[in-house]
Image (cartoon, rainbow, N blue to C red):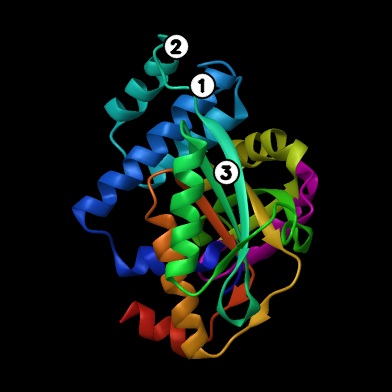
Amino acid sequence: MAGHSQFKNIMHRKGRVDAVRSKVFSKLAREITVAAKLGTPDPSMNPRLRAAILAARAENMPKDNIERAIKKAAGGDAENYEEIRYEGYGPGGAALIVEAQTDNRNRTASDVRSAFTKSGGSLAETGAVSFMFDRVGLVAFDAKVADADTMLEAAIEAGADDVKSDENGHEITCDQGALGDVSKTLEARFGEPLRTALIWRAQNTVDVDDETAEKLIRLVETIEDQDDVQNVFVNFAVSDAMMAKMQG
């Protein structure tokens, strides 16, 4: 496993305690509110809002919470959040991209920098590592909705660029501008996807030993624990042995 999905898969297998789940819901609600405020509160007309709602449903966020986050934006009383991207390096030379939404740029920058430093990483200038990633759209489905050949054929017809299928599911990637159309076309055939999102996909992955992998995973955990951080994308790969250890 590597790239954007690696850490999320580990976290899902490890499970979440209530306190962590509450923080996840808070971040999901913030993204829903921001998406609704920037566009329209109608998810059928707002691809970003639809993606945010799908992400919330995937985490079993209550319907009332989702509706409340949308109404908050429609009511005009939502905070004004600024979207910021941070880039940096971790142990072993791995690259990380951090996406945050904040109402206090100085606070968030300080928190993210501290998280990098605390875990053996270093914050870099914007653009220092993003050239090693591609900004693409992602649509993910459960493995049981279709076999690999059927999904590949459907994805190509929908306008996607690439499909990766294994026992964990199907990941369809496309040009970021085509995400809305690709997602809707595939959903009409296979049902609601597990995830629809814009991601930073590493062009190549860095192989690291298990000791370095543990340090990197702790770094990602520390960064993601920051209230203003929405997403963390990485370019390192974890061995099967380390995956098994993290799942244990």
* Residue plotted at (45% across, 60% down): 114
Find out whether the residues at labels 2 and 1 contact each other: C-beta distance under 8 Å.
Answer: yes
Q: CA distance from mark 2 to mark 1?
A: 7 Å
Whether residue 219 is visible here, answered yes or no, is: yes
Q: Please report whichever mark, 2 or 3, sits nearer to the chain's N-terminal start.
A: 2
Residue 210: x %, y % from top left:
49, 89
> Front-most of 198 and 147?
198
Judging by the rendered image, the residue that carries numbered circle 3 is: 196
Q: Indicate left or right for 189 with 64 as reference.
A: right
Classify the position of the N terminus by image quarter: bottom right
**Number of on-image labels:** 3
Extent of the magenta region: 148-169
Q: Amino acid at mark 1?
A: Ala
Disc number placed over residue 135 in the picture, else none: none
Residue 110: x %, y % from top left:
47, 50
> Front-most of 8 and 92?
92
> Badge 2: how crowded within 10 Å, few (<14), some, or many (20+)?
some
Judging by the rendered image, the residue that carries numbered circle 2 is: 74
* Residue plotted at (49% across, 75% down): 120
Q: Secondary structure at mark 2?
A: helix
> Badge 3: how crowded within 10 Å, few (<14), some, or many (20+)?
many
Judging by the rendered image, the residue that carries numbered circle 1 is: 36
* Residue plotted at (47% across, 44% down): 108
Q: Amino acid at mark 2?
A: Ala
Farthest top residue?
Answer: 75
Find out whether the residues at labels 3 and 1 contact each other: C-beta distance under 8 Å.
Answer: no
Residue 158: x %, y % from top left:
75, 42
Residue 82: x %, y % from top left:
55, 31
